[in-house]
Image (spheres, rainbow, N blue to C red):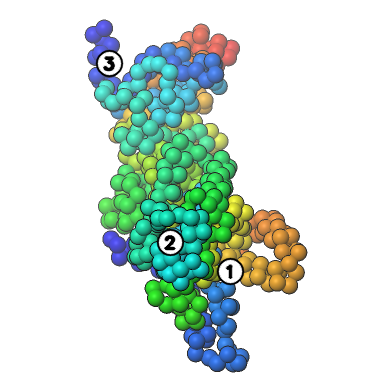
Amino acid sequence: MNTISETRKKSLLYLDNVCVAFDGFKAINSLSFVIEPGELRAVIGPNGAGKTTMMDIITGKTRPDTGTVLFEDTIDLTKKDEADIAQLGIGRKFQKPTVFESHTVWDNLELALNRSRGVFATLFYTLSPEDKSRIEEILETIRMTHRKDEYAANLSHGQKQWLEIGMLLAQEPKLLLVDEPVAGMTDAETAETAVLLKEIAKTRSVVVVEHDMGFIRELGVKVTCLAEGSVLAEGSIDFVSNDPKVIENYLGR
Amino acid sequence: MISGFVFRALEGRIVVAVGILLGIGILVPALNLLTPPDSALHIPTYAMSLFGKYLCYALLALALDLVWGYCGILSLGHGAFFALGGYAMGMYLMRQIGSRGVYGNPILPDFMVFLNWKELPWFWHGFDWFVFAMVMVLVVPGLLAFVFGWFAFRSRVNGVYLSIITQAMTYALLLAFFRNDMGFGGNNGLTDFKDILGFSVQADGTRAVLFFMSALMLSLCLILASAIVRSKFGKVLVGVRDAESRVRFLGFRVENIKLFTFVVSAMMAGIAGALFVPQVGIINPGEFAPANSIEVVVWTAVGGRGTLIGPIIGAILVNGGKSFFTGAFPEIWLFALGALFICVTLFLPRGIVGTIQHGFRSRKAYKAAAEAEKGRDAQPSVAQAAE
């Protein structure tokens, strides 16, 4: 018991025995999952394994039927909604790149900046020099300085993915959940995204859901394999990909 | 902070539009009052009131554009806020009749005497005071929008479901206001007005001032809407329209954003109704008719949603067309309106102003692309530099 409370105390995100059923179908089945501060973790698993549902639970979109979901050991995420959780410092990138298409790249980042988000604060907001340099810094990180005045609708698929990652950076989260960041990217873009995510993970925890095994190998981090709503195997990429259960369920023979 | 908020609003197009509106607001009454009736430049009072009515409709369309064009909330019940503002003004005007009514009762309006009521209902108190009535013009629609929006947006009612319940809201109010025992004149509504602030509502001078006030309020609301839309809040608003969940996961309270916009918009609609009533001389439950609210959507779509100026042009054009058609070919007006809506949806999905704007934007983008193309030979592009 002692070791459990120890892990809990040290953890940034702590899921224990979480279950969710949709119309009787168990999407998540007694899932336990721990992320430590500063950790970069990859999550793999077949379609319907519950990867996206897990993210929905962490970000407040879906309420679990049972189980514990704690952030920084004390905050019960099951009692909060999306906006609360985002303000606590959990950022989420969707599977399909979701940016504000009718805004420029700059405006997308400005909206995402971690500033007061109330109605009147935003009505009377003016861009301060700090905010300006912060946005420029993020533009630099996601390599989009030259496209800052472009409408997001005109960006390529890969650039939209990066813009969304940039928006999450602007949000200054402690934990970043990234759903399939390299889906539909070219090999060069995939490699660059791996570099970008590793860079980001230096200052915060990141959870990456991905199907692309090459990409995960490139990240070189601890891997969790989900199947049918619970953890199948956890460990290094070589350990997980040699696990017979993982081969059976996911990788295929 | 506040000055920045207003300053941002005064972008080129808005300044021009406000200038034109205020110009019309001064010129039309001047031509009505200062030229002799047989002059070629004379604008008859009925025409001025008719155009004043269009300006009120334009304000209503602007209010709808704020929620529909920018926030993506397709309200099919904005006529209700307009009518409530109109009723608040109507109640003031009824109280001004005093003992000049048919039954000569100094306190009770005619319809109450007719219904054998002995006392003024509690909710009619205070409406003899202009300032109170004007506050109610804002508060009543605003409060309804607040209560309605509080429940609807908190329970995340979206899209077509929201449109249907707004339609149900205005229909329920229509039925309620038709009832005599509601105390708002039932079927006949409120009419037979005499004075406003001591001036006869029939007098040319009063009509002229009402016309000017319509143009002025439309201009002020246009500036306010522009300030809202161009602030960071306005960008969030467009974000809610295009990718609501993204806004939510960025930590914004989408329900508060929608609620604020909905209430501001309802208040604008209330102002429009209040200016409409003294110019047409009557307010009755017919104004709550669901079809009215749908017509507002047509005006906004024709002019171009999400452009602020488009809905103003749309409301004036469609209503001008309506006045012409219902006079010249009364039986085909509804067909013409239907055809217009279909044509706009098919051929001008951005509306008149939206299409023009888009044209300008694509031309600019095309030119920029051509420039970039030329520049490529001279110096290495970013892509080449990256390699």
Looking at the image, residue B19 sits to the left or right of residue B371; the answer is left
Q: Quadrant of residue A47?
A: top right
Chain containing mark 2: B
Q: Nearer the viewer, residue A226 or B340?
A: B340
**Lateral position of residue B189 relative to residue A36, left or right:** right
Relative horizontal placement of residue A40, taking residue A215 as reference (left or right): left
Label 3 neighbour load within 10 Å: few <14, some 14-19, many 20+: some
Look at the picture and state if A123 lies above or below A75: below
The structure residue drawn at horizontal position 32% and vertical position 63%, both measured from the top left corner, is B4
Q: Position of residue B56 (x, y in %)?
A: 51, 66
Using the image, determine if residue B336 lies above or below residue A25.
Answer: below
Q: Looking at the image, which is closer to me, A162 or B228?
A: B228
Secondary structure type for disc 2: loop
Instruction: Identify the residue position indicated by label 2 in the image.
Output: B108
**Between marks 1 and 2 in the image, the one whose residue lies nearer the viewer:** 2
- Looking at the image, can residue B201 be seen? yes
Q: For mark 3, what is the residue?
A: A7
Give amino acid for label 1.
Ile
Q: How many marks?
A: 3
**Mark 3 — on which chain does it sit?**
A
Q: Chain of mark 1?
A: B
Up/down of B279 relative to A75, above or below: below
Which residue is at 38% across, 41% downward?
A: B253
Mark 2: few/some/many CA within 10 Å (<14, 14-19, 20+): many
Q: Earlier in the sequence, mark 1 or mark 2?
A: 2
Pointer 3 and pointer 2 on the same chain: no
Residue type, label 3: Thr
Label 1: state its secondary structure: helix
Write down the residue under mark 1: B316
Kindly identify the residue that appears in the image at 62 percent across and 67 percent down.
B319
